[in-house]
Image (cartoon, rainbow, N blue to C red):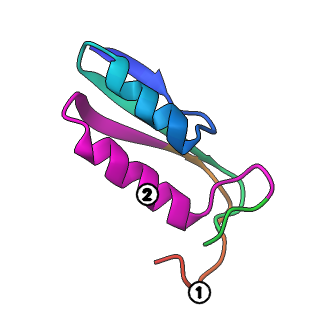
Amino acid sequence: QAVVSLNNSTFEDLAALDQIEDDFYAVMPIVGTITKEDVLCAKGTATMTNDLERLGDNPKVKGVIMRIDSGGGMVSGTE
């Protein structure tokens, strides 16, 4: 099975995953400070949640690997 890295994908890029013919695992990197809202080039938890829900709706996605490189982040609103 294939492994697809999402990097800093946009919502439109996630729609393109529907074009992949085989089952795959998605790698979702989370780098830097974790915040609720998107900041500069980093996705916030609200966007990450939407991405995870979108991946969960795709029957070809067999699992999501979250690669986290973060020292932490906001407490308020990130649960």
Quickly name the residue at label 2.
50
Quarter of the picture containing the N terminus is top left
Question: For the residue marked with disc 1, what is the amino acid?
Answer: Ser
| Quarter of image, res 72 | bottom right
Residue 12 lies left or right of residue 52; in this view the side is: right
Q: Residues within 10 Å of mark 2 (few under 14, many from 20)?
A: few
Residue 51 lies left or right of residue 21; in this view the side is: right
Spot occupied by residue 19 in the image (x, y as percentages of width and height): 35, 19
Q: Residues within 10 Å of mark 1 (few under 14, many from 20)?
A: few
Q: CA distance from mark 1 to mark 2?
A: 18 Å
- Taking the spot 42% from the left edge, 34% from the top edge, the residue there is 15
Quickly name the residue at label 1.
76
The answer to whether residue 74 is above or below residue 26 is: below
Question: For the residue marked with disc 2, what is the amino acid?
Answer: Asn
Q: Secondary structure at mark 2?
A: helix
Q: Secondary structure at mark 1?
A: loop
Residue 3 in magenta stretch: no
- Taking the spot 27% from the left edge, 32% from the top edge, the residue there is 61
